């Protein structure tokens, strides 16, 4: 099983001839938010595309990746509405709500209720939903409404991988979960009260991979720029104290982990 990090909350999981992409976003600029050529360079193939919430740094390239790969897109009603506004056919869009699970040959995906990390003023950026496709495809960051935020469990290649792409959670929904790999949102994590205590009080993982701590307006080819290095270091330092025996692996941009 291969697990590759492509910045923000973008991951590629590959096992056999199955390739699943999570929040594939590679354009990493505001104008335009999506460059299909860049998206194709970094995400050339996919069996399935899964979107954890609908902000631009998670969703803006998904329609382009779906278009050139032919993959289904799994996500919230808002994700489906946005993809449809870009011309993706509804039969390629799989709407998942909290508690829903979808199985396909080679992988399964399950959505759990979760929460987005809050801004300093206590609100969620660009909150809201698209219950139906917007009249025109979103072009700017504020038009990518959050659409609800989900923790996502993947089963692929014999592994269970849980993504908490935004540094917040709904404690009750994750209680007792045991996974092989936890992809742990680290962007702004200190704004969520007792974030790490609550995550590791509910979820046990053999390996933790932090994510969403990079400056996602820096192009992938320029290498990683960590937004708050001291805060990331503190997160990495505290995990083994809260979850003894859990390994932490900080990946470089584009690095691939090969899991046996
Ligand atoms: Zn977000």
Image: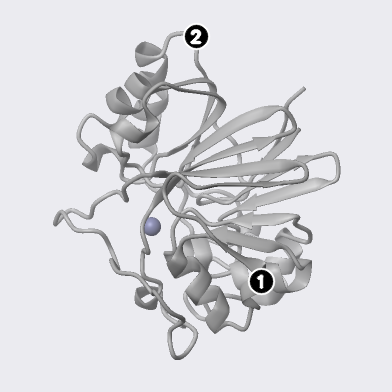
Disc 1 marks which residue? 91
Task: Classify 7 as above or below 217.
Answer: above
Q: Give how far apart the Cα atoms at labels 2 and 1 are.
A: 44 Å
Q: Residues within 10 Å of mark 2 (few under 14, many from 20)?
A: few
Name, please, the residue furthest toward the right. 17
Q: Is residue 85 above or below residue 64?
A: below
- The residue closer to the viewer here, 131 or 231, is 131
The reply to whether discs 2 and 1 touch (Cβ–Cβ < 8 Å) is no
Q: Residue furthest bottom?
A: 135
At label 1, counting other C-alpha atoms closer than 10 Å, the crowd grade (few under 14, some 14-19, many 20 or more) is: few
Whether 68 is drawn above or below 196: the answer is: below
Expressed as whole percent of the image width and height from the top left, the position of residue 39 reads 67, 67
Question: Does 15 sit above or below residue 67?
Answer: above
Q: Residue at horizontal 44%, vertical 54%?
A: 97
Look at the image and tell me in which quarter the N terminus lies. Answer: top right
Q: Which mark is residue 68?
A: none
Is 74 in front, or is 59? 74
Number of callouts in the render?
A: 2
- Percent position (x, y) of residue 182? 51, 31
Tell me the quadrant of the picture where the C terminus can be found.
top right
Describe the element under mark 1 as helix, strand or loop. helix
Relative image position of residue 189 (x, y in whole percent): 31, 39
Residue at x 73%, y 26% (from the top left corner):
259
Residue 164 lies in quadrant: top left
Give the quadrant of ligand 1. bottom left
**Left or right: where 111 falls relative to 242:** right
Q: Which residue is mark 2?
A: 245
- Residue 133 horizontal/vertical position (percent): 46, 81
């Amino acid at each position: 099983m291969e697990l590759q990090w492509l910045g923000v909350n973008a991951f590629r999981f590959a096992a056999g001839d199955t390739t699943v992409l999570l929040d594939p976003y590679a354009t990493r600029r505001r104008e335009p938010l999506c460059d299909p050529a860049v998206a194709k360079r970094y995400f050339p193939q996919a069996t399935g595309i899964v979107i954890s919430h609908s902000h631009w740094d998670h969703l803006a390239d998904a329609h382009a990746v779906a278009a050139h790969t032919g993959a289904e897109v799994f996500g919230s009603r808002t994700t489906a509405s946005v993809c449809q506004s870009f011309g993706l056919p509804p039969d390629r869009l799989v709407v998942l709500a909290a508690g829903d699970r979808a199985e396909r040959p080679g992988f399964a995906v399950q959505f759990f209720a979760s929460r987005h990390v809050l801004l300093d003023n206590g609100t969620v950026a660009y909150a809201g939903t698209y219950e139906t496709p917007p009249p025109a495809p979103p072009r700017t960051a504020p038009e990518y409404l959050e659409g609800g935020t989900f923790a996502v469990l993947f089963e692929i290649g014999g592994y269970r991988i849980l993504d908490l792409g935004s540094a917040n959670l709904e404690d009750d929904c994750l209680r007792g979960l045991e996974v092989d790999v936890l992809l742990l949102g680290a962007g702004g994590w200190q704004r969520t009260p007792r974030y790490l205590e609550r995550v590791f009080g509910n979820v046990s993982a053999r390996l933790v991979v932090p994510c969403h701590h990079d400056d996602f307006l820096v192009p992938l080819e320029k290498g990683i720029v960590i937004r708050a290095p001291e805060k990331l270091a503190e997160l990495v330092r505290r995990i083994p104290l809260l979850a003894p025996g859990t390994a932490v692996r900080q990946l470089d941009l584009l690095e691939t982990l090969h899991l046996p």
